[in-house]
Amino acid sequence: MTPPAAAPAFLNTHGWDGAQILPLAGDASFRRYFRVVRGGTTGVLMDAPPQHEDSRPFLQVADHLHALGFAAPRVIARDLAEGLILLEDFGDDRMAEVIAADPARETPIYTAAVDLLRDLHRHPAGDLPPYDMTVYQREAGLFPEWYMPAVGLDVPAGYDAAWAEALAPIAGDRGVTVLRDYHAENIMLLRNGSLGLLDFQDALAGHPAYDLVSLLQDARRDVPPALEAAMLAHYGPVDGAAYALLGAQRNTKILGIFTRLWKRDGKPRYLSFQPRVWDYLERDLAHPALAPVKAWFDAAVPAEKRAVFWEGFQA
């Protein structure tokens, strides 16, 4: 987490001369984050190397969310040629850690997160690309591309066709802003009591059930089934078939992405999440709407290559 070479000059140009640059976080992409401290003022420096990351969608979606009254980090300064953006600092009270420290707050915080989605879904999606069949299929394709060879399996025919059949009823839905990575590690509890949003640069226009799945079938932490059911009822009504379809599609994608992070990017820590993701996927595949996809999985991926394969796995 060495700061980018261009960071001091960038900060000097924008009135943050002499600021400390402290490691804050990295994520599953090439982006890195640093806390910038100057006197009693702090900001967050996002380092998104332009050869790997296009920061323009982040700025566009931030503007969209601000216009709707939601808390995305305010942009203080930017230099897209260097891939540097200085952002408002939302502090350290991330949803996941706050709940871990005080489990009694789990239900009220999840209720607030569902309320935010309910409010967001009252607004049109705006000028965002569609979450359509092309995107669904491209994402689902990460499973045969990365997971199957990693566990020593061939890829039988029929995968794309099974997803096309299952997803057809919802693939044209462009009704709401889909943040796409809305979960407990990307939601901040702000001092004013509202929720701050992070990691929304991949937002698309799609189905309202997707971000509910992202929140309630969280790859990184256990969400008790009773809490999941209560939050779906709180949002209500939710199309159960759409929720299962998008849960299956998302969890299949995640299994591929986490395998890729291990194999290609040298980030094996994500493998520890695979059993949880498999548990979600197995539950989603049990819905009748997933019948063609379940049939493919049953034929192509034996039980010993699913969740059990990753228990105690060491890369």
Image: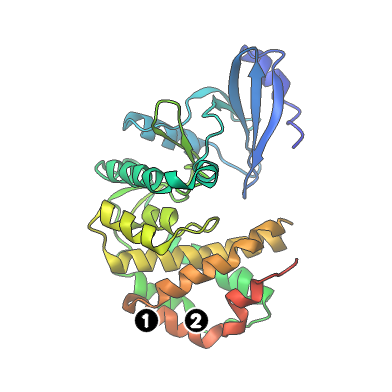
Where disc 1 sits, the SS reads: helix
Residue 137 numbered tag: none
Which of 41 and 230 lies nearest the eye of the viewer? Answer: 230
- Give the farthest residue toward the bottom: 299
Q: How is the image coloured?
A: rainbow
Q: Quadrant of the N terminus?
A: top right
Where disc 2 sits, the SS reads: helix
Residue 153 lies in quadrant: bottom right
Residue 297 numbered tag: 2
Which of 310 and 230 lies nearest the eye of the viewer? Answer: 230
Q: Is residue 118 visible to us here?
A: yes
Position of residue 114 measured from the top left corner of the image (x, y, whole percent): 34, 47
- Asked if residue 48 lies left or right of residue 69, the reply is right
Which of 216 and 66 lies nearest the eye of the viewer? Answer: 216
Residue 91 lies in quadrant: top right
Whichever of callouts 1 and 2 sits on the residue coming sooner in the sequence is 1
Residue 291 numbered tag: 1
Q: Residue at x 54, y 47 (%)?
A: 100
Q: Amino acid at mark 1?
A: Ala
Position of residue 55 measured from the top left corner of the image (x, y, whole percent): 55, 37
Using the image, determine if residue 47 lies above or below residue 220.
above
Position of residue 275 measured from the top left corner of the image (x, y, whole percent): 58, 69
Q: Residue at x 76, y 28 (%)?
A: 5
